[in-house]
Image: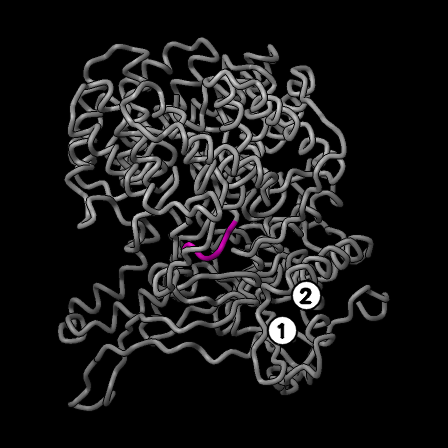
Amino acid sequence: MAERQAPVDLQSPVLLERDHYGWVEFVEHLPCRDKDEVRQFFRRSGAMLALVHLVRGRDYHAENVIASGAHPVAIDVETLCHPGPLKRQANPLLAQVEHKIDQSVMVTHYLTIRAGPKGAIAMGGLDLAKEVDIQFWQFEHPNTGEMTRRSKLIEARESFNLPVLDGEMIEASDYAEEVASGYEETLTFLLTLPEMQPGESSIPRLFEGVLVRWLVDATATYMNLVNGLRHPDLLTDGAMWSAGAESIGGRRMGEGTYHAALVREERRAMLNQDIPLFRVAAGTDRAFAADNSPLKDVSVPAVTPLEFSLAGGDAQRWTAVEGSVIRAALAFGKIGYGKVAPATEQLTLSPEEAREEALRLARLVGELAITGDHQAAWTGIVLKDSGDAIDVGDIRYDFYNGAAGIAVFLAAVAKVCGDDESRDLALAAMRRLANRYRLIGIEAFYDQIGLGGYTGLTSIAYGFDVAGELLDEHAYRALAVAIAAQLPDSAIEKDTGHDVLGGLAGAICVLLRLQRISGDPRLLERAIACGEALMAKQDEKGLWSFMGGAPLTGFSHGAAGYAFAFGQLGTLTGRKDFTDMAQTCLDYERSQFNKDHANWPDLRAMPGEEVNPLSFASQWCHGSAGIGLSRVALGVGQQFPGTALERDIALDTTIRNMPGHVDDLCCGSFGRLMVLDSAGSRLHKPELNATARHWAKHLMNHAHETGSYRMNLGSQEMNPGLMKGITGIGYALLRIAGHHELPDITALT
């Protein structure tokens, strides 16, 4: 790269190579001298990431990179040109999904990795090590009669992967832009080099035939198997220990990846308490054991080339999309999306403009779709199980951000625009959901996604019903009723989500919509069961805590959402206990109101952190917009006095705090605008509708000027979902422009 005048220079250690051994220069973990060197370090990190990604590297985690002053130095490059997975999905659609995920920069492991139970250990190449409270087993007095095994607390690993300035280790989150720009510039440069173009084997010609390591299974998988062999119950029973050693063969037979030579080497390594080592000549199907002996009859999967598949083959656009993933991964949880200045003139969104923009977004969603066997799926940015990092993965099924929500948007475009392409894609998305439901059944589906009205099983029923209504597909509406009517008592009783987004309160809202439309008495019975179960789960304050903390205000997880659900249930059933429960929620939220800010505080706090009583939001999920939404619904009649005043305050505060820092429905501007638009129609206040149309047009213009709507995580291409992505924005544009024949998805009506 230095000879070709690359835009970013990289440093590598000096090698002294001999026939069967070699020497490598010692790489010292050195501090940076100033902030400029810190910036250079992270820009070079982006350049190294581009090189690793292009040549399909894996395993570039924190222990394989050393920060030596202003240079990140890779000390273990054995997993470049890594073959594809040994186990392939039998389902053709899922195989395509897996292939698309494998194109992502996240597979390098250089950005973020979460290992250990619940992903508590941060191990990515640019991750900062953290203290973790996890136990592991360690031998004491090995190879003696007193040998024993005891549990020990894992301490934070000693970190050498990040730069140090003035004695402090510097986090990559503050330098996401440097990493992303270094990646984009370097990848663009590398794609111009002849030797980096794919050869006959689909990998860059420069690397063909190079001996590289083949990680047949994840190191963590092998470690779990090895640790299992250390269990005292096996160590005191030779027959059981031998059976444990044979488990790898049975596992491979079960998943269809059995090769005798492969299993023999895996068993040999694990009996030595070691991780198996396999090598492959890059770009070939020749595999070798640790002693360099050939592995006969082992089929090595081909290296998956980069195909720029997230951008229709456009390398420049694809590079920008991956750059957005880098920014999202490194700056997770930090707000910095660019502000939108107020418009200098009064604007209004016309129905024609809204339909044109919705159709454009539908075409983008179609481009991003993975289709096969008359089904459709999407990949995008998803949260890791640890909740503190992102990945690229299958966005799966639910209404909030999965296929059910995307199907509703496409169905809306099909109805409003008369677009057959959107109709076909909506049906393909619903077909995948229906097939999944029929394959695994209602209880297994509940175990996977929970119960809630936006993220759980009832959210899929809601998606089926709304999309079925818009497409005039009665079979899907019948399926929605069937799913909702069969909600098992066991699922209702063990639900721990509670709230509108992911729990019983949201399930109540969906069940009542379906009951109003179908008249099926089973749905009201299930809604009552959910209400009674939810009341039985109250905490000592008579409400529901969030993540072990205080009960929240707001719609998605807080008192406004609970009041909204119980208010509807009490009105429909005439039961005073449900109405009283709604009033209790309103009273609690009222007690939290801050007059100086004309808003309700966002009481969320991470475990171990103090609640900030002066943290406020104006979003659909938290703060004034969602609270205004609930008050608009509950203010009908005189059942809940005081809601009209709160409603007006909430709507005024929402307008005053426009625009949001992002554009989506959940946390962003378009969720607020849908609330204002719905309130304007229900309250006969056309000035609210006009405000919504003004801001919708302004934000749409801004997206056209910048090339993307402002997403919470990554670019719009990586966020096809409804509540956190572009399909929700498209849906909102149609409703705000006057297409009120579309249901109000912010209220599950």
What crowding class fits label 2: few (fewer than 14 Cα within 10 Å), some (14-19), or many (20 or more)? many
Give the secondary structure at mark 1: strand
Q: CA distance from mark 1 to mark 2?
A: 9 Å
Q: Is residue 537 magenta?
A: no
Closest to the observer: 565 or 466? 565
Residue at 38%, 65% in the rendered image: 266
Instruction: State whether residue 491 is above or below residue 269.
Output: above
Closest to the observer: 576 or 202? 576
Q: Position of residue 488 (x, y in %)?
A: 18, 30
| Residue bounds of the magenta highlight | 387-391
Residue located beneath label 2 in the image: 48
Residue located beneath label 1 in the image: 74
* Quadrant in the picture for residue 41: bottom right
Closest to the observer: 142 or 745? 745
On-image quarter of the C terminus: top left
Q: Tags 1 and 2 in contact by the CB under 8 Å rule?
A: yes
Q: Position of residue 365 (x, y in %)?
A: 59, 30
Answer with left or right where residue 592 lies relative to residue 427: left
Residue at 49%, 66% in the rendered image: 278
Task: Identify the amino acid type marked 2.
Answer: Met
What crowding class fits label 1: few (fewer than 14 Cα within 10 Å), some (14-19), or many (20 or more)? many
Instruction: State whether residue 433 is above or below residue 67.
Output: above
Q: Position of residue 70 (x, y in %)?
A: 70, 77
Q: Position of residue 437 (x, y in %)?
A: 32, 28
* Quadrant in the picture for residue 531: top left
Task: Identify the amino acid type marked 1.
Answer: Ala
Give the secondary structure at mark 2: helix
The reply to whether residue 329 is visible in this rendering is: yes
Closest to the observer: 744 or 560? 560
Residue at 31%, 50% in the rendered image: 546
